[in-house]
Image (cartoon, helix red, strand yellow):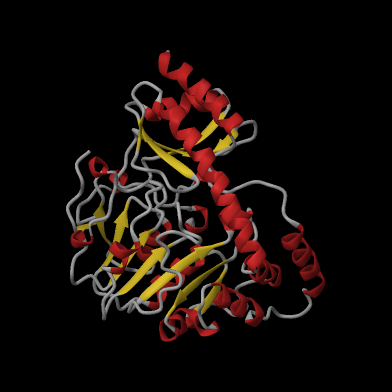
Amino acid sequence: MRAQLTGTPAAGPGADPRDEPDLGHHGDAEVAPGLVDLAVNVRRAPMPDWLADPLVAALGELAAYPDPGPARAAVAARHGRTPEEVLLTAGAAEGFVLIARALRDARRPVVVHPQFTEPEAALRAAGHAVERVLLDPADDFRLDPARVPADADLVLLGNPTNPTSVLHPAAQLAALARPGRVLVVDEAFADTTVAPGVAGEPESLATRRDLPGLVVVRSLTKTWGLAGLRVGYLLGEPALLARFAAAQPLWAVSTPALAAATACASPAAVAAERAIAAGLAADREHLVARLSGLPGVRVAGRPASAFVLIHRPGAAAVRERLRERGWAVRRGDTFPGLGPDWLRIAVRDPATTDAFTDVLAEILEE
């Protein structure tokens, strides 16, 4: 697949909208009763008491309006920031909407793809003319900061990136920050990453306070299975976050969601998160090894998160056959820069992986 040129408009005059990827399609649309879910990147495990207990207690406080103060302080402490550098949101998706609405004056917004489609969808909905930089699959979707236009004043990208599972070096991301530019880094999956000799999250910019215009987007959905609660947050300069807050409805984050944010920012939660990420890494290696042994299947890059991207000619038909056999995986053609020959597969336990890859092998041999 040939990479799209830097700065190519998302859709120009006269473009056929049918040629555009469906930015509103997400993994949950792949799931149906009776299917094993390898399409959604949310960990499903029993909720620990330190998280469940505050959530239950919060149900007794619903008569009062939500107070974000304690949660902001807890999140700020986790990342070595002040509360003014934290904006709590109803999931990371709301964060993208706030950014898009508050920065309507951006002259040249650029989204680095393939990545989560909601940032571009939010920009378009707010009236922005979005340009794309498409990373090259032949180069394992690695980031080249020089490909981002120098005059782009709003740049959005993910790290680790959904759907490629690529973890970009922090130094390359930091090289994109400059005065007059807002750099938005989606770290929704940062808590799923590990690296040898690194105590915390490798390549995260969440604690960086020295980079002008940096906004880090975080989510509690993935590791702690809180997709239905809707809780996330933005980290950045107070003046910039104040602009986003002005676009946010009052009491946007519920009392139970605030309780979850406080609990998940605790030292005990962070330690548990690191242990979960280490286990996930082992499960991911098992999945990659199994996939790499299948005919015609290529695993993209060096996966670093809770999912793996694969290329296989005829993958769209393979996906349909998998559904017939009881397995749901994420289609790739709704991500700009990919196409129908790509599939995203969630990392699960080895037994589930073995059962899935056995079925996939049978389909590929048909």
Camera-side residue of 105 and 291: 291
Q: Residue at x 50, y 62 (%)?
A: 200
Camera-side residue of 322 and 364: 364
Q: Quadrant of the C terminus?
A: top left
Query: Along the horizontal axis of the image, is 79 left or right of 267?
Result: left
* 175 to 141, vertically: above or below: below
Q: Residue at x 48, y 69 (%)?
A: 95
* 22 to 112, vertically: above or below: above
Counting from the top left corner in percent of width and height, residue 345 is at: 47, 38
- Would residue 92 be visible to someone looking at this image? yes
- Residue 203's quadrant in the figure? bottom left
- Would residue 346 be visible to someone looking at this image? no
Camera-side residue of 260 and 275: 275
Query: Along the horizontal axis of the image, is 217 left or right of 136?
Result: right
Counting from the top left corner in percent of width and height, residue 259 is at: 69, 70
Counting from the top left corner in percent of width and height, residue 186 is at: 42, 62
Direction front: furthest residue: 197
Query: Along the horizontal axis of the image, is 3 left or right of 319?
Result: left
Direction right: furthest residue: 60
Q: Residue at x 19, y 72 (%)?
A: 151
Counting from the top left corner in percent of width and height, residue 333 is at: 36, 40
Q: Residue at x 34, y 68 (%)?
A: 127
